[in-house]
């Protein structure tokens, strides 16, 4: 029975990593589509989002079946709970990559706005956070997870800086308003992807250390 349970756990982990790879690819391709003004690539990312949605459903079903059949012990249950929390975060990140592509397609119909360096860095920093969050899960590395969580402050600052720059473009020339607003949305999408990576890492810490660090002050008060 335990060997069968271990096999099911390994299968769940494998499925989650497959989903994670698909999400990383969608994110990378959305950034490429945005920076290279590639409408065809953007449409490909949008079209493939259903595959990630189906993967989420498969993982959810297998997780529920596993709990029902095996009644896992505390440690294994923590792993299953982590999977259940990480999967929707990955799905949301994929949806945000799709949102980036939709705005990129709209931007391609307008004159190109002056490149915004903060937005480019923001995109790549968010991408790095998602990749490192998945690495932390694979390696069971709470130290890496905490580093990713700390990096979220950098992304927040970049989002604010990008917004200020875009606001300047809008004030300088009203013709920039439409493109700048779309780029502002894109900046928020990348910030939310980074938030998703942060949430994943909070669950990695929970998996490794058994500590629930989300809303730390509230959690501490609840434990008193």
Image: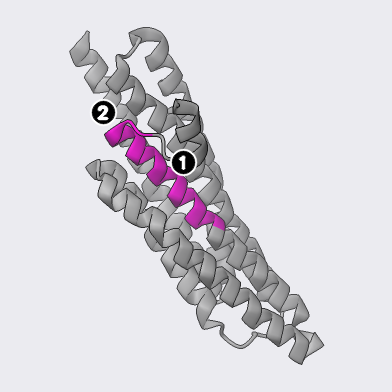
Frontmost residue, 23 versus 109: 23
Q: With 102 as the anchor, is 1 left or right in this view?
A: left
Residue at point 45%, 34% (across, down): 220
Instruction: Residue 58: give x, y in percent of width and height.
Output: 46, 28
Dot 1 or dot 2, earlier in sequence = 2
Residue 37 colored in magenta in the image: no
Q: Is residue 122 above or below residue 54?
A: below
Task: Give the residues in magenta.
Answer: 192-211
Identify residue for label 1.
216
Look at the image and tell me in which quarter the N terminus lies.
top left
Identify residue for label 2.
10
Q: Name the element at disc 2.
A: helix
Q: Is residue 84 above or below residue 179?
A: above
Instruction: Residue 99: give x, y in percent of width and height.
Output: 62, 57
Residues tagged 1 and 2 counted as in contact (Cβ below 8 A): no
Q: Residue furthest left?
A: 3
Residue 208 colored in magenta in the image: yes
């Amino acid at each position: 029975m335990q060997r069968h349970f271990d096999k099911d756990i390994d299968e769940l982990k494998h499925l989650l990593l497959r989903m994670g790879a698909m999400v990383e690819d969608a994110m990378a391709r959305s950034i490429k589509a945005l920076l290279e003004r590639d409408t065809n690539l953007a449409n490909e990312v949008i079209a493939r989002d259903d595959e990630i949605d189906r993967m989420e459903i498969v993982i959810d079903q297998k997780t529920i079946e596993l709990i029902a059949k095996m009644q896992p012990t505390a440690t294994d249950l923590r792993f299953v709970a982590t999977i259940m929390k990480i999967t929707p975060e990955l799905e949301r990140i994929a949806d945000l990559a799709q949102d980036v592509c939709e705005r990129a397609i709209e931007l391609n119909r307008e004159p190109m706005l002056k490149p915004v360096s903060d937005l480019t860095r923001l995109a790549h920093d968010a991408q790095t956070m998602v990749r490192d969050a998945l690495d932390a899960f694979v390696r069971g590395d709470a130290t890496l997870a905490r580093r990713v969580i700390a990096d979220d402050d950098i992304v927040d600052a970049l989002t604010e800086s990008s917004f200020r720059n875009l606001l300047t473009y809008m004030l300088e020339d009203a013709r920039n308003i439409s493109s700048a607003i779309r780029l502002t949305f894109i900046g928020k999408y990348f910030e939310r992807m980074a938030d998703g990576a942060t949430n994943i890492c909070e669950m990695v810490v929970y998996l490794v250390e058994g500590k629930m660090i989300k809303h730390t002050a509230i959690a501490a008060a609840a434990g008193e």
